[in-house]
């Protein structure tokens, strides 16, 4: 979805031709996998989505203007929500001080967004779901960034679904609301971690990422409040799933797969994932290669316009990415895992700690002679993921030989030492390993993350019997956001944040 598209709707002829070209691209990709060399440098990258708020802590739909003030720098991109912007950190080598350089780079880029947003009376905030977001705002016309690709995506999903979007989610409170478009998707702001791997290692890296996913969500949940309701610790995951679901209830009952997808099996090749995408999901945005301006060959490698555009409209929590060589280069293409399941973190230090944990753990898991995915059922891994989204750091997760245990205990006693071994194997500087994994250890030890801080703070501000969307709840959420922004500005990790009475 990163590319512009030429129209808001497509004809049956365009859809038919796209499907034909998509099948051809899949075959081309298969041949390229078999015959070509791929970059295997193992570099890492990061994308971070930010909310924009006004002086009262309410969403500020000034994203397009903020991007104009950033002078067209391609490190900053629009999002479907006009109250969001995205920053992209260049790839780095993780060896030595790579993670620290990424931390400094993310902080510097957020400061640039802060300066640009201030010109338009707004402030950026990293958070999974903005607590002050209201249904009135999402039902207004100002929520969406006015670009063809977003209007086309909205139209395609709504036409495929044929019904209103229904958000139905319950835990501490119950939210049931219908929307005329996919606006709730814009509430879901995330951090996406990229891990470059060779075709030979891709299956193991993706399987390891799937197995690790639940522990990531449990540690880093930061979205417990949506439209004034106290819901799952990481409500962003079910809200995102429901908001762009193209299936009616009948199709769900028939077992049709959702476009926001954990998957259904461990894989043996990256090709498995792209083949499933083509087999199971109809194209949403059948933009031709010619209309997009994409070449057939880029940097001496297949550009695969049709396959890549289609892949961008299947939202796996760990998504496979094929990237052709840059246009100015004759180098090889590369593959990477895009780890998409984390919310935007409470602080930059928390974000890089999350990255260190993920990269270290995955690299250790893939080196096992008897890997975890040979002993953990895929359905059990998915159940872990859902449990972590619901209960966060208080979830109970299944793990081979350990049974079902508290997420915090699993992380402290078993997964964190493995993440440390992985970072040591990757030659990360020892003081940095101690620093970043120390943040993770304290978060797990104290059972404290962004979600728990938000819920405890809300309870300190309003009576237990306060109602969602009541004036007192709304005022408390605005105060919560102000406290969150002030603490985020300190740069201190969330496990150190106090809950003021």
Image: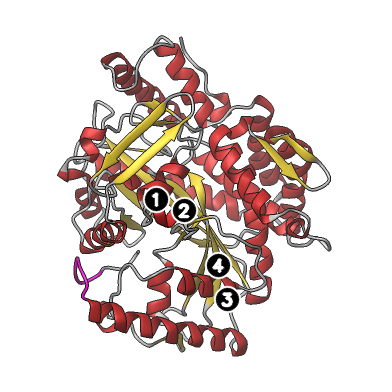
Closer mark to the observer between disc 1 and disc 4: 1
The stretch in magenta equals 5-11
Q: Which residue is mark 1?
A: 249
Please state, as top left, top right, bottom left or bottom right, where the N terminus lies in the image.
bottom left
Indicate the position of residue 211 as horizontal and vertical percent values: 67, 53
Q: Are marks 1 and 4 in contact (CB under 8 Å)?
A: no
Q: Which residue is mark 4?
A: 336
Q: CA distance from mark 1 to mark 3?
A: 30 Å
Q: Which comes sooner in the sequence, label 1 or label 3? A: 1
Q: Residue at left 59%, top 60%?
A: 264
Q: Dot 4: within a 10 Å radius of its alpha carbon, few (fewer than 14), some, or many (20 or more) residues?
A: many
Indicate the position of residue 361 as horizontal and vertical percent values: 70, 52
Q: CA distance from mark 1 to mark 2?
A: 6 Å
Q: Nearer the viewer, residue 97 or 478?
A: 478
Q: Which residue is mark 2?
A: 253
Q: Which comes sooner in the sequence, label 1 or label 4? A: 1
């Amino acid at each position: 979805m990163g590319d512009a598209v030429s129209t808001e709707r497509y004809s049956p002829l365009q859809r038919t031709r796209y499907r034909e070209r998509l099948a051809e691209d899949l075959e081309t990709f298969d041949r390229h996998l078999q015959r070509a060399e791929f970059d295997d440098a193992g570099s890492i990258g990061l994308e971070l989505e930010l909310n924009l708020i006004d002086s009262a802590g309410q969403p500020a739909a000034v994203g397009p203007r903020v991007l104009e003030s950033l002078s067209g720098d391609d490190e900053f991109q629009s999002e479907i929500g006009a109250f969001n912007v995205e920053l992209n950190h260049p790839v780095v080598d993780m060896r030595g001080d790579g993670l620290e350089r990424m931390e400094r780079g993310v902080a510097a880029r957020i400061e640039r967004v802060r300066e640009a947003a201030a010109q338009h009376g707004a402030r950026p905030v990293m958070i999974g779901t903005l607590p002050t977001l209201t249904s009135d705002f999402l039902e207004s016309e100002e929520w969406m960034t006015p670009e063809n690709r977003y209007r086309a995506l909205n139209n395609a999903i709504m036409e495929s679904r044929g019904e209103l979007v229904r958000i139905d989610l319950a835990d501490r409170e119950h939210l049931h609301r219908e929307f005329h478009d996919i606006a709730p998707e814009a509430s879901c702001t995330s951090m996406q971690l990229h891990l470059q791997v060779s075709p030979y290692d891709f299956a193991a890296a993706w399987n390891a990422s799937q197995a690790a996913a639940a522990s990531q969500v449990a540690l880093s949940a930061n979205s417990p409040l949506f439209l004034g309701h106290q819901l799952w610790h990481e409500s962003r995951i079910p809200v995102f799933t429901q908001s762009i679901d193209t299936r009616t209830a009948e199709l769900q009952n028939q077992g049709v797969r959702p476009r926001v997808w954990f998957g259904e099996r461990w894989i043996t090749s990256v090709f498995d994932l792209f083949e499933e995408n083509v087999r199971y999901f109809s194209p949403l945005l059948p933009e031709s290669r010619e209309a997009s301006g994409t070449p057939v060959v880029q940097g001496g490698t297949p550009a695969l316009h049709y396959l890549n555009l289609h892949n961008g409209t299947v939202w796996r929590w760990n998504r496979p990415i094929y990237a052709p060589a840059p246009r100015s280069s004759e180098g090889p293409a590369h593959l990477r895992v895009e780890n998409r399941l984390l919310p935007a973190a409470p602080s930059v230090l928390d974000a890089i700690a999350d990255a260190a944990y993920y990269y270290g753990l995955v690299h250790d898991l893939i080196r096992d002679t008897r890997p975890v995915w040979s002993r953990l059922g895929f359905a059990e891994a998915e159940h872990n993921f859902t449990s972590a989204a619901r209960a966060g750091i208080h979830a109970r997760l299944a793990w081979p030989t350990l049974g079902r245990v508290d997420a915090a205990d699993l992380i402290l006693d078993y997964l964190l030492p493995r993440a440390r071994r992985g970072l040591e194997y990757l030659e990360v500087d020892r003081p940095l390993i101690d620093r970043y994994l120390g943040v993770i250890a304290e978060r797990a030890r104290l059972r404290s993350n962004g979600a728990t801080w938000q819920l405890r703070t809300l309870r300190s501000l309003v009576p237990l019997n306060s109602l969602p969307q009541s004036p007192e709840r709304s005022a408390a959420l605005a105060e919560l956001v102000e406290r969150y922004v002030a603490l985020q500005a300190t740069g201190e990790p969330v496990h150190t944040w106090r809950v003021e009475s």
